[in-house]
């Protein structure tokens, strides 16, 4: 069977940064994210008995990827099959936006590959499967606000929707800063970060952050949501600055972007920033303030560097005719 799935990228408001099991990808702490509408991955999987290895095409180019083969082995084990597959993936993310995170990639692959293998997994089990490809993909199975329950093992570490179809007019503006600098993968980065003397404090405070974030979403408290998100991101980057060896994802422009957001706040426009395993800054705001924020940011950044996204949907199977009912 040939199956195609679409999954959207998500940005964490309370970050995941560090694992207690590197093989199964069990995180040290829970995390909460917002799935976005504009950035997504479409992946088609077809198992073919004539293949002697998995074949992978990403954005039209043949690729070798050990991580992906490892993931497909999990799918084969689950479906009790030995067949290899054709995998064809397209990222619908503006080039160099740094938003083509593995979250949409492994969420789409988990759904397409498990369906093509004849499995009909529940959303919970899909999130457990996606987790084995990439931690953040666990959350992209659902739309809107999503929590990844850290758990202790394969069975207890999965995502739950907090508000799949949110009516809250919340938005994220990605400030795209091209980086010539060599990227440190999230996998390597979070492993090094765990050497920081502050790591125990990160884990300890994550639980309070999760509690406040759930409350902020429930009560539509934008100030609380933004304050906690900004603090979680800064704590994550502080781990990188204090690990052995220390490293950072900041570019000079990342700092300028953060200062612009802080300036906007002093001007009375509520907005907050977050940053992941790359130099791009994402501004969290409410719909009514997008125009004013873009206006201020365009004093230092080009309009083409500013991409606006809204809450997006969970992973879906798609056909040529559109979304498949599931
Ligand atoms: O699961 P990965 O390898 O995409 O790592 C995600 C790490 C962060 O994006 C920095 C934080 C997060 O929770 O998504």
Image: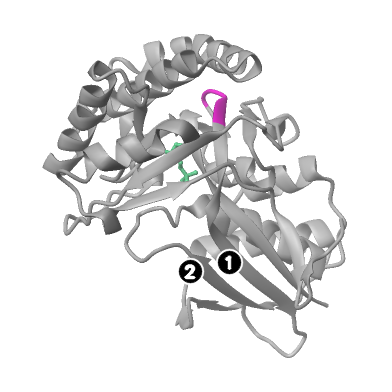
| Residue 187 in the image, given as x and y percentages of width and height | 41, 45
Query: Which residue is identified by label 1?
Result: 69
Q: Tell which of 255 and 86 is nearer to you.
A: 255
- Gap in angstroms between the C-alphas marked 2 and 1: 7 Å
Q: Residues within 10 Å of mark 1 (few under 14, many from 20)?
A: some
Name which residue lies at 23% across and 37% down.
296
115 left or right of 152? Answer: right
Q: Residue at x 29, y 25 (%)?
A: 239
**Mark 2 burial class by Cα count in 10 Å: few <14, some 14-19, many 20+:** few
Measured as percent of width and height from the top left, residue 45 is found at 70, 74
Check residue 159 for magenta coloring. Answer: no
The answer to whether the residue labelled 2 contacts the one labelled 1, judged by CB atoms less than 8 Å apart, is: yes
Q: Quadrant of the C terminus?
A: bottom right
Q: Where in the figure is residue 100, as x and y percent of width and height?
A: 44, 57
Cβ of mark 2 under 8 A from ligand 1: no
Q: Mark 2 points at which residue?
A: 65
Query: Residue at position x 48%, y 69% from top?
Result: 65
Residue 31 in the magenta stretch? The answer is yes
Q: Nearer the viewer, residue 1 or 246?
A: 1
Compared to residue 50, the image places residue 82 above or below, namely above
Is 28 situated left or right of 202 in this image?
right
**Viewer-nearest residue: 298 or 166:** 298
Q: Could one spot residue 170 in this view of the protein?
A: yes
The image position of residue 196, as x and y in percent, is: 28, 22
Q: Characterize the magenta stretch by its predominant secondary structure.
A: loop
Which quadrant is the N terminus positioned in?
A: bottom right
Secondary structure beneath dot 1 equals: helix
From the viewer's perspective, is 21 left or right of 276?
right
- Residues rendered magenta in the picture: 28-32
Q: Is residue 203 visible?
A: no
Secondary structure under the numbered disc 2 in the rendered image: loop
């Amino acid at each position: 069977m040939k199956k195609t799935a679409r999954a959207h990228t998500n940005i964490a408001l309370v970050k995941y940064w560090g694992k207690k099991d590197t093989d199964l990808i069990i995180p040290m702490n829970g995390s909460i994210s917002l799935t976005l509408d504009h950035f997504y991955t479409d992946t088609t999987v077809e198992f073919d008995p004539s293949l002697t290895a998995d074949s992978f095409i990403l954005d039209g180019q043949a690729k070798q990827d050990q991580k992906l083969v490892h993931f497909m082995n999990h799918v084969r084990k689950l479906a009790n099959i030995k067949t290899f597959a054709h995998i064809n993936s397209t990222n619908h993310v503006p080039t160099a936006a740094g938003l083509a995170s593995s979250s949409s990639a492994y969420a789409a692959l988990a759904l397409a590959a498990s369906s093509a293998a004849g499995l009909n997994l529940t959303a919970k089990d899909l999130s457990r499967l996606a987790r084995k490809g990439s931690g953040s993909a666990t959350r992209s199975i659902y739309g809107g606000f999503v929590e990844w329950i850290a758990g202790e093992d394969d069975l207890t570490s999965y995502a739950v929707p907090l508000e799949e179809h949110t009516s809250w007019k919340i938005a994220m503006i990605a400030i795209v800063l091209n980086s010539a600098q060599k990227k440190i993968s999230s996998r390597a980065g979070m492993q090094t970060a765990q050497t920081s003397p502050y790591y125990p404090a990160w884990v300890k405070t994550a639980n309070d952050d999760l509690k406040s974030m759930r409350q902020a979403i429930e009560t539509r408290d934008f100030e609380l949501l933004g304050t906690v998100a900004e603090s979680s991101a800064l704590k994550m980057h502080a781990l990188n600055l204090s690990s052995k060896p220390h490293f950072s994802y900041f570019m000079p422009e990342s700092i300028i972007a953060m200062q612009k957001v802080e300036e906007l706040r002093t001007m009375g426009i509520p907005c907050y920033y977050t940053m992941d395993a790359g130099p791009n800054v994402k501004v969290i705001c409410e719909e009514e303030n997008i125009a004013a924020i873009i206006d201020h940011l365009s004093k230092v950044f080009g309009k083409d560097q500013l991409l606006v996204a809204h809450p997006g949907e969970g992973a879906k199977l798609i056909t040529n005719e559109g979304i498949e009912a599931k």
